[in-house]
Image (spheres, helix red, strand yellow):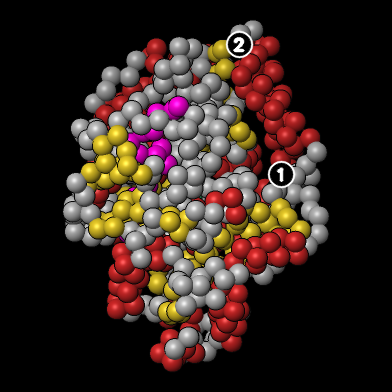
Amino acid sequence: MDKVNLKKLEALNNQHVIKVVEEAIKLCKPTKVTVITDSEEDINYVRELALINGEEKKLKMEGHTIHFDGYYDQGRDKAHTKYLLSKDVDWGINVNSIEKDKGLKEIYSYLDGSMTGKEMLVRFFSLGPTNSIFSLKALQITDSAYVAHSEDLLYRQGYEEFKKLNGSPDFFFFLHSAGRLENGVSVDIDKRRIYIDLEENRVYSVNNQYAGNSLGLKKLAFRLAIKKANEEGWLAEHMFIMGVHGPKDRISYFTGAYPSACGKTSTAMISGQTVVGDDIAYLKKIDGEIRAVNMESGIFGIIHSVNSEDDPVIYQALIIPGEVIFSNVLINNESPYWEGMKKDIPDKGINFSGEWFEGKKDSQGKEIPCSHNNARYTLRLNELNNIDSRANDPDGVPVKAIFYGGRDSDTTMPIVESLTWAHGVFLGATVESETTAATLGVRGVRKYNPMANLDFISVPFGIYIENHLKFADELKAAPKIYTTNYFLKDRAGNYLNSKLDKKVWLLWAEGRVHNEFEAVETPIGRIPKYEDLKELFVRELKKDYSEEEYIQQFSLRTVKYLEKMERMSKIFENTKMPAAFTQELKAQIERLRETRTKFKEDIISPFKFLDK
Ligand code: SPV
Ligand code: MN
């Protein structure tokens, strides 16, 4: 490291930082080391480097670039993301782990010399707003300027924040190498590894570029944060945060957890509302209320189906000058194209498969689409015209309601309010969802995904749930909890709702928070009354909502629910769960059975619960 860079490092007055950087240099053997501060000059250096080393290319529109991940590096690699554990653990959920010494030896061998001929970048970030009790500090070392550039768009600068550590080792550390590159993409995919050391608060990642695998600050820091949150009694969740705009300029803040590619960003972007964050929230109890911050400051969003009608705010930000990284879309004439953009797509260009032409097939004879289903855009939230004015508030925003949702074609209703906080925790913990393109592997398989967080939970599941149950203690008023399902289908396989309907569910919940609507009590929770929805559909979507639609969407599918409860009972059979949770499960099953017996029907119309 030259003198200038060493000086930047030394100015932090933190021996622990120096130590990890020195160790990383010794291991990865970079040809050059550059320390990046919060200065515009340093940040621009990273931006330029991504272009110079070919990881990004300029597009026609000012500020836009394209990055490609390898053909087999298009989603999170769950199989090779593992916890380094020094002893066996029983977390009650499937944990992908490897014995620590063995794992370290393996990943060190892949990282050894991985940066020879390359430049190591050392960057500092703040997870959460700066000058805030929520914030955590993160140190990222990477040889990928794309990774460092993406993090610049997605997270807040932290070099100055690190100075406030006063020499403490209380920071997360991420070491990443994209490994050997050909045409700008990682090629040694068989040696792709992401190993998480919960004891040391550090993560090693090698031979990959897809952001979910490579960016330490995204899902890797999230795993470390979940453990920290559980130890300290707060929550780190896979949640959006948004300002829901009710009548008379009223803003109620909601958070919501959805599995990847199941409507989390699109909920946060519903027209007329404002966005605080779209992926990861930290929640703390402050003065008797729950407050939340976005630990990020940008969006790494799915671009599939983003178009001027369905996602006008994002679409607008993608077609005007501004700092945007497109990944894994089609490039033709230096312009980006993607599936579902509702524009004519050229019949050839460059995409994640290299030279692409319409009808191109993969090795299995399957047609390659113009853009990958998990193709993304990366931009700062402040590029969006719906950013909430409190998005960077160091005290967070007060949370009035929490949403949980999954991709469920046949069981759960579009929106349900929990009976109590504990019932809400139960509803969140029993979310099931069909798999999507955001992770590698087969799509469309129903999987249990509690709190949309199964991939990231880094503590025993029972403890994770206990932390949720206790979170409502000592609150002046607990937020209401809702489950939503945007993906319900009829027998023929047609969706029962349009994409825009979620706005009605959201505003109904906002009204409920302020006691403006009555609800119908059913065995699985409270649901909207037909008249209220009818009015909201006209007011918000200028749509006539028929009784028939209401009945189709809000009928209680008792057999399906009971089947779901059976699956849940099996899942929790051998898991040590808090008694309150087990009680909720038991009570839920009983209520469903009683109802079925009483009504002698498998599918019960919501109107029948009115005259109970
Ligand atoms: C998700 O898949 O949930 C994402 C993108 O937000 S990433 O985790 O980075 O792959
Ligand atoms: Mn996510």
Looking at the rendered structure, which numbered label has been put on residue 529? none
Q: Is residue 454 left or right of residue 62?
A: right
Query: 565 and 362: which one is in front?
Result: 362
Spatial CA distance of label 2 from label 1 is 32 Å
Most extreme residue toward the top is 600
Residue 296: x, y in percent? 43, 60
Evaluate whether residue 489 shows in this view: yes
- Let me know if residue 314 is in the magenta part: no
The image quadrant of residue 342 is top left
Q: Is residue 39 left or right of residue 233?
A: left
Query: 526 and 270: which one is in front?
Result: 270
Q: Is residue 454 left or right of residue 372?
A: right
Main SS, magenta region, reads loop
Residue denoted by label 1: 93
Residue 84: x, y in percent? 70, 60
Residue type at numbered disc 1: Ile
Residue denoted by label 2: 602
Residue 442: x, y in percent? 55, 32
Evaluate whether residue 299 shows in this view: no
- Let me know if residue 379 is in the magenta part: yes
Magenta region, residue range: 365-380
Q: Is residue 362 above or below residue 578?
A: above
- Ligand 1 under 8 Å from disc 2 Cβ: no
Residue at 41 percent of width and 21 percent of height: 495
Residue at 51 percent of width and 17 percent of height: 555
